[in-house]
Amino acid sequence: MIDKEIKKRLVLALDVEDINEAKELVDSLNPYIGTFKVGLQLFCGYGLEIINYIKEKNSNFFLDVKLHDIPNTVEKASYNIIKNGANFFNVHATGGIEMMRVAKKGALEACEKYNKKPPIILAVTMLTSISQEILENELLNNTNIETLVIELAKNAKKAGLDGVVASARELKAIKKELGNDFIVLTPGIRPSWSVVDDQKRIATPKSAIIDGADYIVLGRAITKAHDKIEAIKKIYQEIKEEN
Protein backbone atom coordinates (compact mmCIF):
# COMPACT_ATOMS: atom_id res chain seq x y z
CA MET A 1 0.00 0.00 0.00
CA ILE A 2 1.46 3.38 -1.03
CA ASP A 3 1.54 5.94 1.76
CA LYS A 4 0.01 9.11 0.30
CA GLU A 5 1.76 11.38 2.79
CA ILE A 6 5.18 9.96 1.89
CA LYS A 7 4.40 10.09 -1.83
CA LYS A 8 3.47 13.77 -1.59
CA ARG A 9 6.90 14.58 -0.14
CA LEU A 10 8.95 12.70 -2.74
CA VAL A 11 10.47 14.57 -5.68
CA LEU A 12 12.41 12.59 -8.28
CA ALA A 13 15.13 14.34 -10.25
CA LEU A 14 14.94 13.26 -13.89
CA ASP A 15 18.65 13.94 -14.40
CA VAL A 16 19.08 11.64 -17.39
CA GLU A 17 20.36 12.13 -20.93
CA ASP A 18 17.68 10.39 -22.94
CA ILE A 19 14.02 11.37 -23.31
CA ASN A 20 12.93 7.74 -23.50
CA GLU A 21 14.72 6.96 -20.25
CA ALA A 22 12.96 9.91 -18.62
CA LYS A 23 9.59 8.73 -19.89
CA GLU A 24 10.24 5.22 -18.59
CA LEU A 25 11.04 6.65 -15.16
CA VAL A 26 7.80 8.63 -15.17
CA ASP A 27 5.80 5.60 -16.29
CA SER A 28 7.22 3.18 -13.76
CA LEU A 29 7.53 5.47 -10.74
CA ASN A 30 4.43 7.63 -11.13
CA PRO A 31 2.54 5.59 -8.49
CA TYR A 32 5.29 6.28 -5.92
CA ILE A 33 6.49 9.81 -6.69
CA GLY A 34 4.58 13.02 -5.94
CA THR A 35 6.55 15.35 -8.22
CA PHE A 36 9.01 14.87 -11.08
CA LYS A 37 11.81 17.41 -11.27
CA VAL A 38 12.97 18.55 -14.70
CA GLY A 39 16.35 20.23 -14.47
CA LEU A 40 18.63 21.95 -16.94
CA GLN A 41 20.14 18.71 -18.24
CA LEU A 42 16.82 17.34 -19.51
CA PHE A 43 15.07 20.65 -20.20
CA CYS A 44 17.83 21.93 -22.47
CA GLY A 45 17.65 18.73 -24.48
CA TYR A 46 13.91 18.13 -24.70
CA GLY A 47 12.09 21.18 -23.33
CA LEU A 48 8.33 20.99 -23.48
CA GLU A 49 8.31 17.42 -24.75
CA ILE A 50 9.13 15.96 -21.35
CA ILE A 51 7.01 18.54 -19.52
CA ASN A 52 3.95 17.71 -21.60
CA TYR A 53 4.58 14.00 -21.09
CA ILE A 54 4.59 14.42 -17.31
CA LYS A 55 1.39 16.48 -17.47
CA GLU A 56 -0.29 13.82 -19.60
CA LYS A 57 0.35 11.38 -16.76
CA ASN A 58 -1.42 13.76 -14.35
CA SER A 59 1.76 14.15 -12.35
CA ASN A 60 3.19 17.27 -10.79
CA PHE A 61 6.33 18.72 -12.32
CA PHE A 62 8.97 20.94 -10.84
CA LEU A 63 10.87 23.06 -13.35
CA ASP A 64 14.28 23.30 -11.72
CA VAL A 65 15.96 25.97 -13.83
CA LYS A 66 17.05 28.24 -10.94
CA LEU A 67 16.23 31.60 -12.53
CA HIS A 68 18.90 34.22 -11.87
CA ASP A 69 18.78 37.31 -14.05
CA ILE A 70 17.62 40.92 -14.03
CA PRO A 71 14.12 41.29 -12.54
CA ASN A 72 12.34 42.05 -15.82
CA THR A 73 13.71 38.90 -17.48
CA VAL A 74 12.86 36.71 -14.49
CA GLU A 75 9.33 38.11 -14.32
CA LYS A 76 8.67 37.19 -17.95
CA ALA A 77 10.32 33.79 -17.60
CA SER A 78 8.18 33.04 -14.55
CA TYR A 79 5.06 33.95 -16.50
CA ASN A 80 5.98 31.48 -19.25
CA ILE A 81 6.86 28.74 -16.77
CA ILE A 82 3.37 28.91 -15.30
CA LYS A 83 1.80 29.22 -18.73
CA ASN A 84 3.34 25.80 -19.43
CA GLY A 85 1.87 24.28 -16.29
CA ALA A 86 4.64 23.99 -13.68
CA ASN A 87 3.51 23.09 -10.16
CA PHE A 88 6.87 24.15 -8.72
CA PHE A 89 9.73 26.29 -9.95
CA ASN A 90 12.71 28.03 -8.39
CA VAL A 91 14.90 31.09 -8.52
CA HIS A 92 18.27 31.89 -6.96
CA ALA A 93 17.93 33.80 -3.70
CA THR A 94 21.17 35.60 -4.51
CA GLY A 95 19.31 37.40 -7.30
CA GLY A 96 17.89 39.68 -4.61
CA ILE A 97 14.51 40.50 -3.10
CA GLU A 98 13.20 42.49 -6.07
CA MET A 99 14.03 39.71 -8.52
CA MET A 100 12.25 37.17 -6.32
CA ARG A 101 9.27 39.46 -5.82
CA VAL A 102 8.64 39.93 -9.55
CA ALA A 103 9.13 36.20 -10.16
CA LYS A 104 6.02 35.69 -8.05
CA LYS A 105 4.28 38.62 -9.74
CA GLY A 106 4.85 37.15 -13.20
CA ALA A 107 3.74 33.71 -12.06
CA LEU A 108 0.50 34.99 -10.52
CA GLU A 109 -0.32 37.01 -13.61
CA ALA A 110 -0.06 33.83 -15.68
CA CYS A 111 -2.20 31.95 -13.15
CA GLU A 112 -4.92 34.55 -13.50
CA LYS A 113 -4.82 34.65 -17.29
CA TYR A 114 -4.70 30.86 -17.82
CA ASN A 115 -6.83 29.88 -14.81
CA LYS A 116 -4.08 27.87 -13.16
CA LYS A 117 -3.49 27.03 -9.53
CA PRO A 118 -0.69 29.16 -8.00
CA PRO A 119 2.58 27.22 -7.99
CA ILE A 120 5.02 26.70 -5.17
CA ILE A 121 7.89 29.10 -5.82
CA LEU A 122 11.13 28.37 -4.02
CA ALA A 123 14.42 30.21 -3.66
CA VAL A 124 17.68 28.29 -3.92
CA THR A 125 19.82 29.34 -0.98
CA MET A 126 23.11 27.50 -1.43
CA LEU A 127 23.79 24.58 -3.74
CA THR A 128 24.45 21.35 -1.84
CA SER A 129 27.67 20.94 -3.84
CA ILE A 130 29.06 24.05 -2.10
CA SER A 131 31.03 23.34 1.06
CA GLN A 132 32.30 25.89 3.58
CA GLU A 133 35.76 25.54 2.02
CA ILE A 134 34.46 26.30 -1.47
CA LEU A 135 32.44 29.24 -0.17
CA GLU A 136 35.50 30.77 1.45
CA ASN A 137 38.29 29.87 -0.97
CA GLU A 138 36.54 30.08 -4.32
CA LEU A 139 33.57 32.39 -3.74
CA LEU A 140 35.55 34.59 -1.33
CA ASN A 141 32.78 34.70 1.25
CA ASN A 142 33.78 34.02 4.86
CA THR A 143 30.22 33.83 6.14
CA ASN A 144 29.22 30.60 7.84
CA ILE A 145 27.04 28.63 5.39
CA GLU A 146 24.18 28.19 7.83
CA THR A 147 24.15 31.92 8.60
CA LEU A 148 24.16 32.78 4.91
CA VAL A 149 21.38 30.30 4.16
CA ILE A 150 19.18 31.75 6.91
CA GLU A 151 19.66 35.31 5.66
CA LEU A 152 18.86 34.29 2.09
CA ALA A 153 15.77 32.43 3.33
CA LYS A 154 14.63 35.55 5.18
CA ASN A 155 14.96 37.52 1.94
CA ALA A 156 12.88 34.91 0.11
CA LYS A 157 10.12 35.25 2.69
CA LYS A 158 10.25 39.05 2.44
CA ALA A 159 9.82 38.68 -1.32
CA GLY A 160 6.67 36.60 -0.78
CA LEU A 161 8.00 33.24 -1.93
CA ASP A 162 6.65 30.01 -0.49
CA GLY A 163 9.94 28.63 0.74
CA VAL A 164 13.47 27.64 -0.11
CA VAL A 165 15.66 24.88 -1.42
CA ALA A 166 18.18 24.13 1.31
CA SER A 167 20.27 21.24 2.58
CA ALA A 168 19.21 19.13 5.54
CA ARG A 169 21.89 20.73 7.69
CA GLU A 170 19.99 24.02 7.66
CA LEU A 171 16.50 22.57 8.02
CA LYS A 172 15.99 23.00 11.76
CA ALA A 173 17.41 26.51 11.75
CA ILE A 174 15.18 27.61 8.85
CA LYS A 175 12.06 26.22 10.47
CA LYS A 176 12.99 27.84 13.79
CA GLU A 177 13.62 31.25 12.22
CA LEU A 178 10.89 31.33 9.58
CA GLY A 179 8.17 29.01 10.89
CA ASN A 180 6.82 25.60 10.00
CA ASP A 181 4.62 27.00 7.23
CA PHE A 182 7.68 28.18 5.30
CA ILE A 183 8.38 25.33 2.87
CA VAL A 184 11.77 23.66 2.66
CA LEU A 185 12.61 21.35 -0.22
CA THR A 186 15.75 19.40 0.51
CA PRO A 187 18.14 18.03 -2.12
CA GLY A 188 21.25 16.01 -1.37
CA ILE A 189 19.15 13.10 -0.11
CA ARG A 190 20.85 9.73 -0.04
CA PRO A 191 19.31 6.57 1.43
CA SER A 192 21.42 4.86 4.07
CA TRP A 193 22.37 2.17 1.53
CA SER A 194 23.35 4.59 -1.26
CA VAL A 195 26.64 6.20 -2.33
CA VAL A 196 27.32 9.89 -1.69
CA ASP A 197 28.41 10.98 -5.22
CA ASP A 198 29.28 14.70 -5.57
CA GLN A 199 27.01 16.16 -2.88
CA LYS A 200 28.68 17.66 0.18
CA ARG A 201 25.77 18.41 2.54
CA ILE A 202 23.57 15.32 2.49
CA ALA A 203 21.04 13.42 4.62
CA THR A 204 18.94 10.27 4.54
CA PRO A 205 15.25 10.53 3.59
CA LYS A 206 14.09 9.71 7.11
CA SER A 207 16.42 12.13 8.90
CA ALA A 208 15.49 14.97 6.54
CA ILE A 209 11.77 14.46 7.14
CA ILE A 210 12.26 14.22 10.90
CA ASP A 211 14.15 17.52 10.82
CA GLY A 212 11.30 19.24 8.99
CA ALA A 213 11.73 18.81 5.23
CA ASP A 214 8.43 19.32 3.42
CA TYR A 215 9.80 17.77 0.22
CA ILE A 216 12.90 15.67 -0.41
CA VAL A 217 14.65 15.23 -3.74
CA LEU A 218 15.72 11.75 -4.75
CA GLY A 219 18.04 11.13 -7.66
CA ARG A 220 20.68 8.61 -8.61
CA ALA A 221 19.82 6.23 -5.80
CA ILE A 222 16.64 5.59 -7.77
CA THR A 223 17.44 6.47 -11.38
CA LYS A 224 20.64 4.42 -11.44
CA ALA A 225 19.30 1.46 -9.47
CA HIS A 226 19.10 -1.90 -11.21
CA ASP A 227 15.60 -2.39 -9.81
CA LYS A 228 14.04 1.05 -9.49
CA ILE A 229 10.77 -0.14 -8.01
CA GLU A 230 12.60 -2.09 -5.32
CA ALA A 231 14.76 0.98 -4.59
CA ILE A 232 11.79 3.28 -4.09
CA LYS A 233 10.04 0.67 -1.94
CA LYS A 234 13.15 0.51 0.25
CA ILE A 235 12.98 4.29 0.67
CA TYR A 236 9.32 4.08 1.71
CA GLN A 237 10.26 1.42 4.24
CA GLU A 238 13.22 3.43 5.53
CA ILE A 239 10.98 6.45 6.12
CA LYS A 240 8.29 4.37 7.85
CA GLU A 241 10.66 2.55 10.22
CA GLU A 242 10.35 3.42 13.89
CA ASN A 243 13.28 5.21 15.51
Image (cartoon, grey):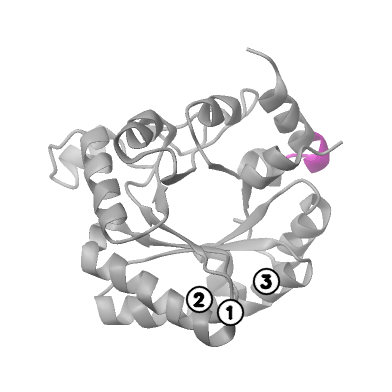
**Disc 3 versus disc 1: distance between alpha carbons?**
12 Å
User: Could you tell me residue 239's position as x and y percent?
Assistant: 67, 27
Q: Residue at x 69, y 38 (%)?
A: 6
Q: Give yes or no for residue 23 being in the magenta stretch.
A: no
Q: Give yes or no for residue 227 being in the magenta stretch.
A: yes
Helix, strand or loop at label 3? It is helix
Q: Amino acid at mark 1?
A: Asn
Q: Residues within 10 Å of mark 1 (few under 14, many from 20)?
A: some
Dot in front, 3 or 2:
2
Q: Amino acid at mark 3?
A: Ile
User: Could you tell me residue 117's position as x and y percent?
Assistant: 58, 70
Q: Nearer the viewer, residue 64 or 226?
A: 64
Q: Is residue 32 left or right of residue 73?
A: right
User: Who comes first in sequence, dot 3 or dot 2?
Assistant: 3
Helix, strand or loop at label 1? It is loop
For mark 1, what is the residue?
A: 84
Q: Amino acid at mark 2?
A: Ile
Q: Is residue 90 left or right of residue 119?
A: left
Q: Verify CB contact (< 8 Å) between mark 1 and mark 2.
A: yes
Q: Verify CB contact (< 8 Å) between mark 3 and mark 1.
A: no
User: Could you tell me residue 92's position as x and y percent?
Assistant: 33, 59
Q: Residue at x 69, y 76 (%)?
A: 52
**Disc 3 versus disc 2: distance between alpha carbons?**
14 Å
For mark 3, what is the residue?
A: 50
Question: Is residue 188 in sight in this rendering?
Answer: yes
Residue most toward the top? 243
For mark 2, what is the residue?
A: 81
Residue 31 versus residue 168 in the image, above or below = below
Quarter containing the N terminus = top right
* Image quarter of residue 168: top left
User: Who comes first in sequence, dot 3 or dot 1?
Assistant: 3
Magenta span of residues:
225-230
